[in-house]
Amino acid sequence: MHLKSEILKEHSKAQTQKIVNWVGSSQERFDELVTLFLGNEYRVTQRAAWPLAFIAIEYPQLAKKHLTVFVQLLGNETVHKAVRRNIVRLLQFIEIPKKLHGTIMNHCFEFIADVHETAAIKAFSLTILQNLSKQYPEIKQELKTIIEERWAYETPAFHVRARRLLKD
């Protein structure tokens, strides 16, 4: 399979699943997908993001060596929202190395407080912060305050995640 051609062929769930199946648990193929994801071609980066997230969720060990770069992308406002959305999507499901906790928490707090951020990025960020609050209970109060401040302005996706977090 020529991965870049397959990514550009179409942007669909079926095509994404085809790429996910092809990569499977292969570190070499996953690294090839990451190279395309980190490249300069907007359309390729955008379309590589979806299968990348699904694979990283299913095989988190494949993403470990790339986490530092992924986290750096969270702070880059010039990357496509699909890139950030799929990075925070996968961060919900993997064990985050301790050295990245602070940076990820900062990004997630910024995302949920940002009135212009997308609903999905906010919802995924809430889950990441909920996961990290088990190790850092001191962030719970700040999280609660932001949720209360943003409540009236947020989407149902935010409300579902926030309720779950507040119950916890």
Image (tube, grey):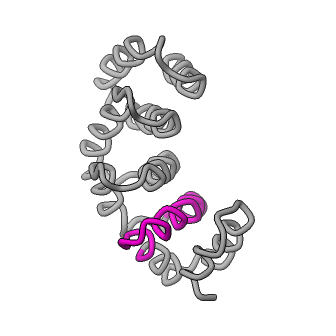
Q: Quadrant of the N terminus?
A: bottom right
Q: Residue furthest bottom?
A: 1
Q: Give the number of callouts.
A: 0
Task: State the predominant SS element of the stretch in magenta.
Answer: helix
Residue 55 is one of the magenta-drawn residues: yes
* Residue at 66% in and 69% down: 10
**Image-based side of 16 in relation to 14, left or right:** left
Q: Quadrant of residue 146?
A: top left
Question: Does the magenta segment cover residue 139?
Answer: no
> In the rendered image of this protein, does residue 75 appear above or below residue 140?
below
Pinpoint residue 139: horizontal percent, then vertical percent: 31, 25
151 lies above or below 160: above
Residue depicted at x 49% and y 39%: 124
Q: Indicate whether 134 appears above or below 147.
A: below
Identify the magenta region: 35-60
Residue placed at 40% from the left, 65% from the top? 64
Percent x, y for residue 24?
63, 75
| Quarter residue 116 falls in | top left
Residue 60 at x, y percent in the picture: 51, 62
- Residue 58, horizontal then vertical, whole percent: 60, 61
- Side of 145 where 17 appears, left or right: right
User: Left of 42 or right of it: where is 12?
Assistant: right
